Image: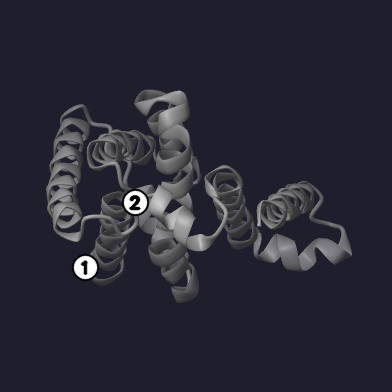
Amino acid sequence: MKLFFSFLLFLSAALFTLALFCGSFQDISWCKFITENYIYFGAGTIHVGLFSAAMIFLWKKDLKTTLDGLSFPGDVLRNLVMSVNGFVLVICTLLVLGIVAALVGFADQSAVYEKVAELPVYILAFAVVFAPVSEELFFRAFLVDRVGVVLSSLLFGLMHFAYGSAVEIIGAALIGVVLAFIYKASKSITPCLVIHLTYNLMSIAVMRLVL
């Protein structure tokens, strides 16, 4: 399986490079499809790459052993409590960030709303279902124990630069810190997945249905 994930990582890197190439040379005829779907093509290859890179290191001899290594699902009741507490902490952290951003006159979240409003339903479904899995496996299960809470969280924040919002990057980094501590405290990837999936679903629903 590690060979398969290595191939998948190589393929995603090659396709992402192709997307960058076509983005720079849009007049090439065979690049038309990629150019027209640049953001979707790029996002898809990035997340497949994150997932593959993480699994190269996290995969054990079989699926059960791998899931056990990630403590998934782990102690269900304990992880549920950790998920609820972590989600509340994430919301409180973002509320404080929003207030501070408004007070200093640096609230640029409208860029995020505009991006989300333009995305088709299947990309939003991808953001709710697959993106939390790829990001949690890479930034928490893989990176936290190797580079620490701070660096893994900073990289997680920078991952969100495409939204064009400095507040989004800072917010994602702060969420990364919360998730990293939840991961270390629970010794399980389950609460991180639950919090991330729930937050993405809630934020997308609010931006699409309310704002």
On the image, the x and y values in percent for residue 136 come to: 41, 48
Give the amino acid type for the residue marked by disc 2 in the picture. Ser
Q: Furthest residue to the right?
A: 29
Left or right of residue 160: residue 110: left
Is the residue 210 above or below the residue 170 in the image? below
Q: Secondary structure at mark 1?
A: loop
Give whichever of discs 2 and 1 has the lower sequence position. Answer: 2
On the image, the x and y values in percent for residue 5 come to: 66, 54
Give the number of the disc on residue 71.
Answer: 2
Query: Crowding at label 2, few (<14), some or many (≥20) Cα neighbours within 10 Å?
Result: some
Give the number of the disc on residue 210.
Answer: 1
Give the number of the disc on residue 41.
Answer: none
Answer whether residue 196 is visible to the viewer in this image: yes
Give the amino acid type for the residue marked by disc 1 in the picture. Val
| Of the pair 41 and 2, the residue shown nearer to us | 2
| Of the pair 85 and 63, the residue shown nearer to us | 63
Left or right of residue 185: residue 169: right
Left or right of residue 91: residue 38: right
Residue at image position (15%, 52%) is 78
